[in-house]
Amino acid sequence: TLVEILVSIIVAGILITSISTITTTQAYISQQARDTTLANAYAESKIESLRSLGYLGLSDGTTDITNELPSELGLPRSASQIVASQAVDIKSVVLTITYNEQGKPRTHTYKTFVGELGVGQY
């Protein structure tokens, strides 16, 4: 009957709308996870390379490292590292990464310390 067809069309419309919303949300979350993973992997690698330089190899100051970021991160993107002496034998390293995540800026900040006697030794 006509009523059954109308009810079927309404139910189908609701289902299609729900599936579309779920698919869009899943794609957004997947992209967000990919970008976060890329930023974390880059930060981990960069911090480990700075730790390998050691205390004496680190110069105090701010360095723009935007050109080192993975190209897969959304534009505009930027990154900087700040090295500062915290004490006579300790330097802090702060790495900040900012990128565009589906129209919104996303910033991650990572901080570590490098001691004169080695990583984690004060």
Image (tube, helix red, strand yellow):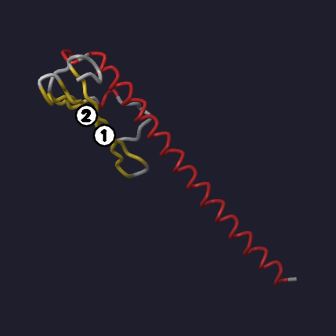
Horizontal and vertical percent for residue 40? 41, 34
Q: Residue at x 24, y 30 (%)?
A: 93
**Above-or-below relation of 59 to 98:** above
- The reply to whether the C-beta atoms of the residues labelled 2 and 1 are less than 8 Å apart is yes
Residue at x 37% of width, y 52% of height = 104
Q: Position of residue 107 (x, y in %)?
A: 33, 44
Which residue is denoted by mark 2 in the rendering?
Answer: 94
Q: Amino acid at mark 2?
A: Val
Specify the amino acid type for callout 1: Thr
Q: What distance separates the C-alpha of mark 2 from that of mark 1? A: 7 Å
- In front: 13, or 79? 79
Name the one closer to the observer, 6 or 105. Answer: 105
Q: Which residue is mark 1?
A: 109
**Quadrant of the image for the C terminus?**
top left
Q: Quadrant of the rendered structure where residue 9 is? A: bottom right
Local SS, label 1: strand
Mark 2 vs mark 1: which is more N-terminal? 2
